[in-house]
Image (cartoon, rainbow, N blue to C red):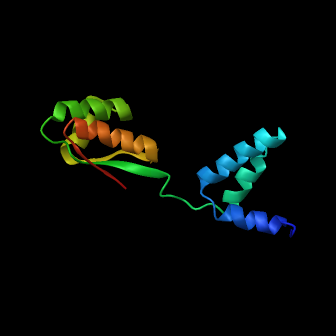
Amino acid sequence: MAKITNEDILNAISEMTILEVNELVEGMKEKFGVDPSAVAVAAPAAGAAVEEGPSTADVVLASAGSNKLAVIKLIKEITGLGLKEAKEIADNGGVVKEKASSDEANELKAKFEEAGATVELK
């Protein structure tokens, strides 16, 4: 049986997704009782893991729709802006939140769409 080299292991890790690398790290913790988090950090740093999409997005209001009052309340809640500023965004559109995580951006988009607004993630 041929010996597996560090290079072989690194090549295998470079073809894994971040989730697969995380599973590998968890397996190493269980098997060896050691936290090899340096492996999980080193692989993405070396460009080994493949990104599955952008990690952040801007939440942009395109249209407030028919229920503008609910949209203004959401804008105030999310941004902390006053009534006048929130109404201005609802009337004219614009960025509601910059560089939100993908999960947060999708969650905000769902809230706005539930209120009848049209939102874009950029």
Quarter in which the N terminus is drawn: bottom right
Viewer-nearest residue: 47 or 58 = 47
Counting the numbered discs, the total is: 0
Can residue 20 be seen at all in this image of the molecule?
yes
Image quadrant in which the C terminus is located: bottom left
Q: On the picture, is 19 further left or further right than 100?
A: right
Residue 101's x, y, as percent? 47, 45
Taking the image as shown, residue 83 lies to the left or right of residue 56, namely: left
For this rendering, which residue is in front, 38 or 32?
32
Residue drawn at the location 71% of the way across and 52% of the way down: 41
| Location of residue 31 in the rendering, given as x and y in whole percent from the top left corner | 80, 42
- Taking depth in this image into account, of 96 and 113 the one nearest to the observer is 113
Residue 67 spot, x, y in % from top left: 15, 34
Taking the image as shown, residue 52 lies to the left or right of residue 86, namely right
Q: Residue at x 48, y 56 (%)?
A: 54
The residue shown at (38%, 44%) is 106
As drawn, which residue projects farthest toward the front? 1
Q: Is residue 7 above or below residue 73?
A: below
